[in-house]
Image (cartoon, rainbow, N blue to C red):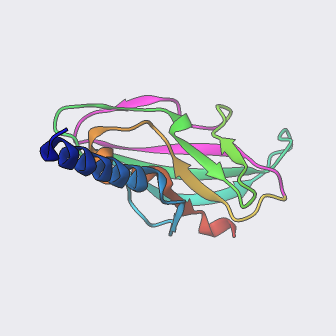
Amino acid sequence: MSLKVVLVGVAGVFVLGGFALLWFGGGPVEVPASTRVRHDDFAFTVESVGRGRSKAEVSPTVVVTLQIENDAKRVGYDWQPSTAYVVDSAGRRYAAGAFASSRPRTIAAGDRATVRLAYRVPSDARDLHLAFWDGVMMGDVFDGGRYARLRVRLEALQ
């Protein structure tokens, strides 16, 4: 085996190891509610957070108003309420409920939308954070999928 092949192989291992550390090496990163979370050409910003309970509900409801910006030049963004979920201090995840959340929609290139997300969480849930997962897009590859590790602190509920 030539020295060139060995050097290329060693360099490849370092490059792949670097990408693995970037993607899998970091745990969750807590950020304030005002943080603009970038996901490729799209961005999410928490506008407001509240808590409520109606007589018909079994558990308290956390309501998040979220602004979504599509900074793409040509491509629409297909928003799904399942993209954003709440995580508590015990690591439990709560999905947005269809009972009071905005419906899925396509946000045109260059446009923005405000959506409402409602989560049923137990009354003992503490240290609530909003997190996002919508797959990996090209822009996410270059920043190591950072958006998926961010945990937006839902400060109004603490």
Which percent across, then down, holds residue 15? Answer: 28, 50
Image: 13 above or below 99:
below
Q: Which of 121 and 19 lies nearest the eye of the viewer? A: 19
Which percent across, then down, holds residue 133? Answer: 49, 42
Which percent across, then down, holds residue 46? Answer: 48, 57
Looking at the rendered image, the quarter that the N terminus falls into is: top left
Residue 35, quarter of the rendered image: bottom left
Residue 5, quarter of the rendered image: top left
User: Could one spot residue 67 in this view of the protein?
Assistant: yes
Q: Which residues are magenta?
A: 100-123
Looking at the rendered image, the quarter that the C terminus falls into is: bottom right
Residue depicted at 16% across the width and 38% down the height: 73
Residue depicted at 40% across the width and 49% down the height: 20
Q: Is residue 117 left or right of residue 1?
A: right
Q: Is residue 157 left or right of residue 81?
A: right
Which percent across, then down, holds residue 9? Answer: 25, 44
